[in-house]
Image: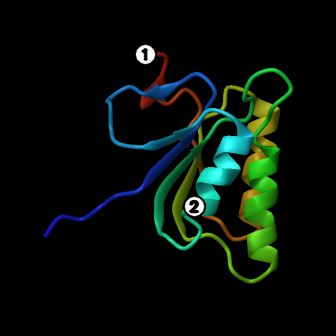
């Protein structure tokens, strides 16, 4: 029996360096749409970058996750991994999602994501 792993990466430029299978969103709008399509699926890992190019940031995605938790139906996410190179943004993101009960780990500079 094959077990399917669902990994989502939200980053405007970087990808997984090991080529692992993942759903990738390059903008916050695309990430919101992607997460909406997987609203009732278990997401094993959700990798988040803070700054998504230009004036776009991860905050529309955070708002979606917060609203779901506020409504009593948080997204089913095994781990949220924050790989942002923006320390203040990453700290705020970490604090916000933890407040809503999501399991969050900061992994700045992770070799798992990079420019390919």
The vertical placement of 35 against 15, above or below, is below
- Between 98 and 69, the residue placed more toward the observer is 69
Q: Secondary structure at mark 2?
A: helix
Which mark is in front, 2 or 1?
A: 2
Residue at the image point whose x is 38% and y is 25% from the top: 17
Residue 7 pos. (x, y %):
44, 51
Residue at label 1? 116
- Between 25 and 70, the residue placed more toward the observer is 25
**26 sits left or right of 57 in the view:** left
Residue 88: name its quadrant. top right
The vertical placement of 60 against 5, above or below, is above
Of the numbered discs 2 and 1, the one sitting upstream in the chain is 2
Residue 100 pos. (x, y %):
75, 69
Looking at the rendered structure, the number of numbered marks drawn on it comes to 2
Numbered badge on residue 44: none
Numbered badge on residue 37: 2
Q: Residues within 10 Å of mark 2 (few under 14, many from 20)?
A: few
Residue at the image point whose x is 47% and y is 69% from the top: 42
Residue at the image point whose x is 80% and y is 36% from the top: 89
Q: Secondary structure at mark 1?
A: loop
Residue 14 pos. (x, y %):
53, 24
The vertical placement of 32 against 13, above or below, is below
Residue 30: name its quadrant. top right
- Between 84 and 33, the residue placed more toward the observer is 33
The residue at the far left in this view is 1
């Amino acid at each position: 029996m094959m077990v399917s792993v669902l990994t989502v990466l939200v980053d405007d430029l970087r990808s997984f360096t090991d080529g692992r299978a993942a759903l990738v969103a390059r903008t916050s709008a695309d990430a919101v749409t992607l997460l909406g399509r997987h609203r009732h699926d278990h997401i094993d890992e959700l990798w988040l970058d803070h700054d998504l190019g230009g004036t776009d940031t991860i905050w529309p995605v955070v708002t979606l996750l917060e609203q779901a938790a506020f409504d009593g139906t948080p997204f089913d996410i095994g781990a949220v991994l924050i790989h942002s190179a923006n320390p203040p943004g990453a700290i705020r993101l970490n604090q916000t999602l933890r407040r809503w009960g999501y399991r969050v780990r900061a992994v700045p500079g992770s070799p798992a994501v990079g420019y390919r």
